[in-house]
Amino acid sequence: MAITIAMFNNKGGVSKTTTTFNLGWILAERGHTVVMVDADPQCNLTGMVVDIKEDDALASFYKDNPGRNLRDALEPAFASRPKPLEPVDCVAVEGIDGLYLIPGHVGLAEDEVSLGIAQQLSESVQALKNLPGSFRFLFDITADALHADFVLLDLSPGLGAINQNLVATSDYFIVPASPDVFSVMALESLARVLPRWNRWAMNASQLEALSGADYPFPQPALKFLGTVIQRYRLKSGAATEGFRAYFDALDTAVETILTPALDKAGLLLERHKYDEAGMDQSLRLQSIPDFNSLITNSQQVRRPVFALTKEDMVSKGFVWDTQKASIDSFRALFTQLAERVEILTS
Ligand SMILES: Nc1ncnc2c1ncn2[C@@H]1O[C@H](COP(=O)(O)OP(=O)(O)O)[C@@H](O)[C@H]1O
Ligand SMILES: [Mg+2]
């Protein structure tokens, strides 16, 4: 059975999508088979894998690839079709073996309401009883079909029914954050919401209607892997002091607010696991600096910054030697991130 990891923060722009892509890629480089899921109706992750720069490209993609996206794949459950869910024919990510994508769909947001009603914890929702278990069921059969080791869920910001479902039915979650005042506030809200979602999932899994559904609601087993801090808001050279202060504020918020709340809710791994992974009290999986100019190349060639090659750079007019050191340092950071994820989930 594949290990499912949700990237979650109710704040946008904290690198959830970028981290999903980069972590997925490096895990695949390390020999794992990985399925990424674009569960954000904004479809940014899909845009990193499939060329959808042209205005109508996403619409053509859906037309040319029927059923090949998260929303269409779930349609048998959401439209109560007398047809079982089937594994998604994932898109193989170009340039790397073993990395796949379940593309997103802009219309997924429309399913939020039905799912919300189905998740109201009432035995009277017979007609909707298959919805709460359908996402995890789909991920499991898709991962099984590919013999995948990991499923990485890229979520939208926000606290709606879909995120509640996807986080609470995952095995693990990572919180990407950035060193600013809003991320500190977001952690406070996560400390309140995550225990609530987990309690909901515990109750849901006890409900006869949901556990006996065609797509049974899974037994919750959620655990926190840690945060990934991106420092990309830092303007070069300037504001180092203020930035440091937010870094410290984030660590403090994790240690004094998030961790105690998760601990109380049973959402932490045993301390020795984090020790084994070389993580301290801040439970920080990794800090990633600004990609600076490498981001442009990375987006052009659809490869992570750490996987850029000489050809990728030189052909775009960059001087290789000056970029190589930077690429290598990102590789070291993402390698350590992947190692930690391997250790924590083993
Ligand atoms: N370490 C980084 N350095 C520079 N830019 C980054 C970094 N991480 C993410 N970005 C950029 O920041 C923006 C937001 O990142 P994204 O992954 O889309 O965040 P989210 O999914 O949380 O909204 C994107 O344009 C992305 O390319
Ligand atoms: Mg995103």
Image (tube, rainbow, N blue to C red):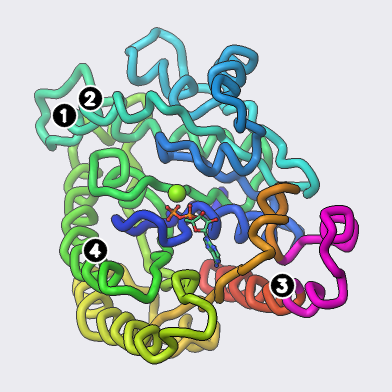
Mark 2: secondary structure: helix
Asked whether the residues under the numbered discs 1 and 2 touch, taking CB atoms below 8 Å apart as contact, a structural biologist would say: yes
| Image quarter of residue 312 | bottom right
Q: Position of residue 77 (x, y in %)?
A: 37, 20
Residue occupied by mark 3? 331
As measured in the structure, the alpha-carbon distance from the residue carrying label 4 to the one carrying label 3 is: 30 Å
Q: Nearer the viewer, mark 1 or mark 3?
A: 3
Q: Position of residue 249 (x, y in %)?
A: 29, 85
Residue occupied by mark 1? 117
Which numbered circle lies on residue 190?
4
Q: Earlier in the sequence, mark 4 or mark 2?
A: 2
Magenta segment boundaries in residue numbering: 306-327
Q: Nearer the viewer, mark 1 or mark 4?
A: 4
Q: Residues within 10 Å of mark 1 (few under 14, many from 20)?
A: some
- Whether residue 258 is visible, yes or no, is yes
Mark 4: secondary structure: helix
- 321 magenta-colored: yes
Amino acid at the residue labelled 4: Leu
